[in-house]
Amino acid sequence: MSRGYDRVIDSDVAVDSDATGPRDSSRNSLQFQNFHANETLETGQQDNSSGGFFTSGSSTQNVLASKKYLWSIDYYSQFFNVSSDSVLDRLLNALFPMKNFFEIVNGQPDLYAPIWLATTVITVLYFASTVAGYLASHISHQPYAYQFSTLTSAATLIYGYTFITPVLAWGVLRWYQCEPSLLETVSLYGYSNAAWVPVSFISISPLEFFHYATLSNWIRWIAVAVGFSISVAFLIRNLLPVVNRADAKTSQLMVVGVVLLHIAFSLAIKFLFFSYVHAMD
């Protein structure tokens, strides 16, 4: 028979001597079972147990994500499906890291911050650096030349740190069986850039007009230090519960590594975008 038909199971029953007995008993002895429904059910149960590449397999969103191809636009569009209120709540938490970021995300991280917020920081850094450079040239009585290479430097630094660093951190954490989520780690580093937007505007010091170059430079250093403190506190506040799944020595080394990388990142922002030499007459 074809595999598309249902299988017929004939059970052995006692046949009565009455003429109607065999017909009734044989009618009751035929039982039909749909094996295709059972196979479909078992297959569905197995599919639900597997998760996607970026997230764990516990939520419905992750199961649906695993049904889509990694190279398709539909796969990544779901990570931008976030409301404005959710983004605002996550931004405020990045600036005032009082709550656990992963609890706020609740298994639904987004790529809004790693892409759009990082792009905003790049634009603001370039704008602030250009204005601050113009003011520095003004008090030095020198013509100012626009440096479009600053935009390239900003894009390389911000995008590189936002995407490469969390991938490396995720790999190390996974090696030590801390089981982080790659997308949540990338989203965490993306939102940590929020502090650099106000830092960039503060670094445009109007005191340059009054020839207070040293004071303006101190203001920039303080602004960068505050930006570093807020962003690194946000990272450590949320990564600490994850790294603590490893042994004590390993977790301490990972925390130190995160802090050192962030120090280097903050110093790069200061010296690449807000470091000027004033030639006073």
Image: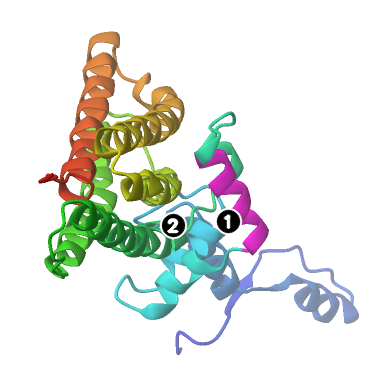
Tell which of 87 and 184 is nearer to you: 87
Q: Is residue 49 left or right of residue 147?
A: right
Query: Whole-Å distance between the Cαs marked 1 and 2?
Result: 8 Å
The x, y position of residue 185, in whole percent, is 37, 44
The residue type indicated by label 2 comes to: Ala
Residue contact between numbered discs 1 and 2, judged by CB atoms under 8 Å: yes
Please tell me whether residue 93 belongs to the stretch shown in magenta: yes
* Residue 250 visible in this rendered orientation of the protein: yes
The x, y position of residue 88, in whole percent, is 61, 53
The residue sitting at 25% across, 39% down in the picture is: 213
Which residue is the site of mark 2? 113
Give the residues drawn in magenta, as a range.
Answer: 83-94
Quadrant in which residue 33 is drawn: bottom right
Lower sequence index among marks 1 and 2: 1
Tell which of 58 and 70 is nearer to you: 70
Outermost residue, front direction? 281
Which residue is the site of mark 1? 87
Q: Residues within 10 Å of mark 2 (few under 14, many from 20)?
A: many
The residue type indicated by label 1 comes to: Val
The residue sitting at 10% across, 46% down in the picture is: 279
Q: Is residue 97 left or right of residue 55?
A: right
